[in-house]
Image: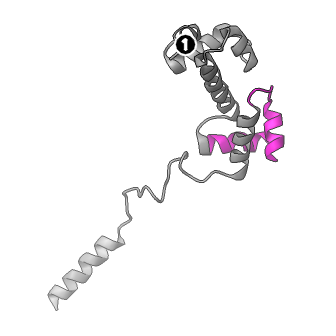
Amino acid sequence: MLKQFEATLINALIYGQPNTLQNPLSAPEPARRISPYFVKRTEEFILAHAHEPLSIEQLAEHAGVSVRTLFSGFREFRNTSPMAFLRHVRMERVHLELRNPGTDSVTDIAMKWGFAHLGRFSQEYRKHYGELPSATLRFRR
């Protein structure tokens, strides 16, 4: 009888304690969670229209939500802002064009993708790719 009581008490103590270990399936990282429709819709719109001048108001209108909701959705599910996502997409497109053998000049490509301040663009490009845009253009791989 004492052994049965002891086993019951131990089970009650063990199973009665809260689980302090985090289960990866119960608390996924923001990038892995299913995003709301407006985040996905905005990403698709940006990918299709990155070459056009876009404002946060246009993005929110296309997504069908307020600017504040769009910002909070991107912050929560992508850990960035919609405009930072747009800059990232544009930077990738510039990088691809600079690696293309038919490319003429860094200035033309940067301007085409909406980077009007060439000094700032050059710094950001170097931060992303570890080299200046002119080096990418010169040493096409």
Q: Is residue 34 left or right of residue 10?
A: right
Task: State the image quarter where residue 116 is shown.
Answer: top right
Q: Is residue 24 left or right of residue 104?
A: left
At horizontal 25% and vertical 83% (from top left) the residue drawn is 8
Q: Is residue 29 magenta?
A: no
Task: Say which amino acid is labelled 1.
Answer: Thr
Residue 4, compared with residue 21, is above or below; it is below
Task: Name the spot of residue 119 as percent of width and height, x first.
Answer: 65, 7
Task: State the image quarter where residue 7 is shown.
Answer: bottom left
Task: State the image quarter where residue 53 is shown.
Answer: top right
Task: Name the spot of residue 38 as percent of width and height, x first.
Answer: 73, 48
Reading the image, the residue beneath label 1 is 136
Task: Name the spot of residue 108 as percent of width and height, x first.
Answer: 72, 11
Task: Name the spot of residue 43 as percent of width and height, x first.
Answer: 69, 40
Q: Which residues make up the magenta segment?
A: 50-76
Magenta stretch: dominant SS?
A: helix
At horizontal 19% and vertical 82% (from top left) the residue drawn is 6
